[in-house]
Amino acid sequence: MTLEELTERIRQRAATNPPLGYRVKFDLGDDGVIFWDGTEAAPQITNEGDEADTTIGISADDLTKLIEGTLSPTLAYMTGRLKVSGSMGVALKISQLLED
C-alpha cells in the first residue's frame, strides 16, 4: 500500500474505535510518517510528524501486513520488524485497534 492508502486505512480504524487519548507516530522510514492525534474528540490522522507519546518504527510493507491481519504485532515486535519508543501500553492499544 502507498502512504496515502495506509493513512486512509488508519483513519478508518481510528474513526470506528473509542478515542485513543494519546499521540502516536508511525515512522515508516523513507516512506514517510503517519501521525495519529488521538487526544481530540475526532482523531486527526496526518502525514506530518509531531511530538508523540509513542513512536512505532515499522516498514510500510509490515504495517500493511498488520492492518490486513497477516502479521502478528507480537511477532513483529519480537523479531525486530516493529520498534517502539515511548509508552509500550499505548503501542499495545494501537495493536489491538489494528487487529479489529
Image (cartoon, rainbow, N blue to C red):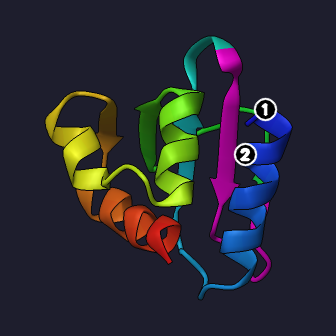
Q: Which residue sits at x=82%, y=55%?
A: 8
Above or below 44: residue 87: above
Is-magenta flag for residue 42?
yes
How far, Cα to Cα, is label 1 from label 2? 6 Å
Name, please, the residue furthest toward the top.
30
Q: How many marks?
A: 2
Amino acid type indicated by mark 1: Thr
Q: Is residue 40 visible?
A: no
Characterize the local packing of mark 1: few (<14), some (14-19) or many (20 or more) Cα atoms within 10 angstroms. few
Task: Identify the mark at residue 60; answer none if there is no mark.
Answer: none
Residue underneath mark 2? 6
Across and down, in percent, residue 37 comes to 67, 59
Residue in view at x 52 percent, y 64 percent? 22
Query: What residue is at 40 percent from the left and 72 percent from the top?
Result: 96
Q: Position of residue 38 (x, y in %)?
A: 63, 68
Within the magenta stretch, is there residue 21? no
| Region of the chain picked out in magenta, as a range | 31-44
Q: Amino acid at mark 2?
A: Leu
The quadrant holding residue 27 is: top right
Q: Crowdedness of circle 2 by 10 Å Cα count: few (<14), some, many (20+)? A: some
Q: What residue appears at the point 55 percent right and 31 percent down from the top-left corner?
A: 61
Secondary-structure class at tag 1 = loop
- Look at the numbered disc 2 and give the secondary structure of its residue: helix
| Residue 16 on image: x %, y % | 70, 85
Residue 2 is labelled as 1
User: Contact (CB < 8 A) between labels 1 and 2?
Assistant: yes
- The N terminus, quarter of image: top right
